[in-house]
Image (tube, rainbow, N blue to C red):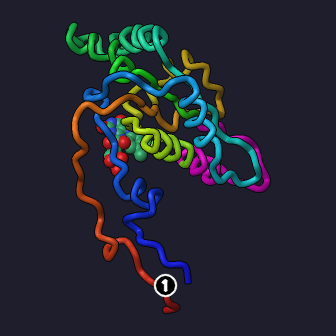
Amino acid sequence: MRIIDLHIDPTIELLLTRRSVKPLTMIGPGPSDDELETILRVASRVPDHGKLAPWRFLIFKGEARTEFGKLLRERFSEIEPMANEDRLALEASRFLRAPVVVGVVSRVVPSQKAPEWEQLLSAGACCQNLLVAATALGYASNWLTEWYAYDDVISGALGLADNERMAGFIYLGSPSVPKDERERPALADICAEWSPR
Ligand SMILES: Cc1cc2nc3c(=O)[nH]c(=O)nc-3n(C[C@H](O)[C@H](O)[C@H](O)COP(=O)(O)O)c2cc1C
């Protein structure tokens, strides 16, 4: 039997300590182009029943984050006509919270093999791999959806087709504060050995 010290194995250690970082505490730099390419390669290397690649990635860097913010502001003022200037400014600055944001688009394609459910799960795996790869490279990351992942007008502006929807926006930057921890479910509450009734 192979014996490994779980807390010395670097992959296990990373997975046991990975933690989301609040985008408002993220600072620069974000991943370089080469690092981002590595992160995206990891993100696209996920289980995918039928090899459908039922996902794609939208990358927001630099000025594009400001431009996207203008759309968010405009759309939010339509949805919430009473929104005050502070709130509109917050909407405009959503993507400025991190140097890089990767939108993970779930793209469900007709398949005899892989039902929609499995294709959606595969997109979720992309999101998780993005977080893990970013953490491995020393970056802060967070998987958020917020209202704009579910808004038809924003989806149109993002160029989503009818079979596409946002699985999430992954914010990537550098950490500025030490990692905290949050409560995790006790394994005893979520695991059970199956046995026949
Ligand atoms: C699909 C999905 C969407 C999420 N969207 C939001 C969101 O819109 N706003 C938010 O505050 N947290 C959201 N979260 C939760 C954050 O990712 C949260 O910080 C994270 O679950 C903390 O756990 P961790 O430290 O284990 O990553 C979302 C999580 C998932 C899986």
The part of the image, by quadrant, that contains residue 174 is: top left
99 or 53, nearer to the observer: 99
The magenta segment is: 106-124
Q: Is residue 78 left or right of residue 46?
A: left
Residue type beneath disc 1: Trp
28 or 147, nearer to the observer: 28
For disc 1, the marked residue is 194
Residue depicted at 23% across the width and 11% down the height: 82
Relative to 123, say whether 68 is above or below: above
| Residue 151 counted in the magenta span | no
Q: Position of residue 103 (x, y in %)?
A: 52, 29
Residue furthest bottom as drawn: 197
Residue depicted at 46% across the width and 39% down the height: 137
Q: Position of residue 41 (x, y in %)?
A: 63, 38
| Residue 119 counted in the magenta span | yes
24 or 167, nearer to the observer: 24
Name the quarter where the N terminus is drawn.
bottom right
Relative to 163, say whether 60 is above or below: above
